[in-house]
Image (cartoon, rainbow, N blue to C red):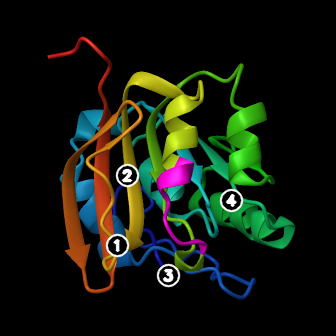
Amino acid sequence: MRVAGGDARGIRLKSPSVAGVRPTTERVRAAIFNILDAEQVMDRRVLDLYAGTGSLGIEALSRGAHSCDFVERNRRQSLDLQENLQRAGYAGDGRVHCADVSRWLSLSSAGLEPHHLALLDPPYRMGDPTPTLEALSDSETLHPEATVVVGHSSRMALPERIGDLRLYDRRSYGDNAIAFYTREFAGAA
């Protein structure tokens, strides 16, 4: 598993040491960042939920993101993620939070600077990611003009709207699907 683009392109990341962790493939990561505009990533604060190996957030850092908060509940996987940040040269740009995503969103996100880009690729066995997207929409962690990118099974269709998040693009790559949301507030045209 390698970083697909940016300054750290080609750097090998440590594979998951925890059973059931399914890193976002290099092909899908490259596609995500090719779809996003550079200004959605460059110098932005990023949030990587269900971080696993950290490959999505590290990809964002490699492409010029200012910083990234990684949320991963498994302690052993969190240590591997920290090692991946060091391998890629971003140990000072990423913060690893070993916590359950729902709990972290409800308790820990308050007081942090808002994130401009949220990336999440939850385990498929978790099922529908809509409740996490609702919690994310309700949290204080997103910037008013944030973009949210969620990976999910291509056998599942996500809603057009989730809270103040509006779907603006979706792509499928075999069994993997990616949905792109932007924040849209009441009264906005």
Q: Amino acid at mark 3?
A: Met
Q: In screen coordinates, is 171 left or right of 165?
A: left
Quadrant where the image shows the C terminus: top left
Q: Which mark is residue 149?
A: 2
Q: Which mark is residue 86?
A: 4
Q: Are marks 4 and 3 in contact (CB under 8 Å)?
A: no
Nearer the observer: mark 3 or 1; the answer is: 1
**Residues at marks 4 and 1, CA–CA distance in whole angstroms:** 35 Å
**Residues at marks 4 and 2, CA–CA distance in whole angstroms:** 25 Å
In which quadrant of the rendered view does residue 16 lie? bottom right
Name the residue rendered at 26%, 33% in the picture: 39
Query: Which residue is at the far right?
Result: 75
| Residue stretch in magenta | 126-132
Q: Amino acid at mark 4?
A: Gln
Q: Is residue 101 above or below residue 127?
A: above
Q: Earlier in the sequence, mark 4 or mark 1?
A: 4
Q: Earlier in the sequence, mark 4 or mark 3?
A: 3
How far from the left and from the top, in percent, is residue 98? 81, 54
Q: Amino acid at mark 2?
A: Val
How far from the left and from the top, in percent, is residue 65? 44, 39
For residue 182, say whether it is visible: yes
Q: Are marks 1 and 2 in contact (CB under 8 Å)?
A: no
For residue 63, say whether it is visible: no
- Residue 113 in magenta stretch: no
Dot 3, crowdedness within 10 Å: few (<14), some or many (≥20)?
some
Q: What residue is disc 1 on?
A: 156
**Residues at marks 3 and 1, CA–CA distance in whole angstroms:** 26 Å
Dot 1, crowdedness within 10 Å: few (<14), some or many (≥20)?
few
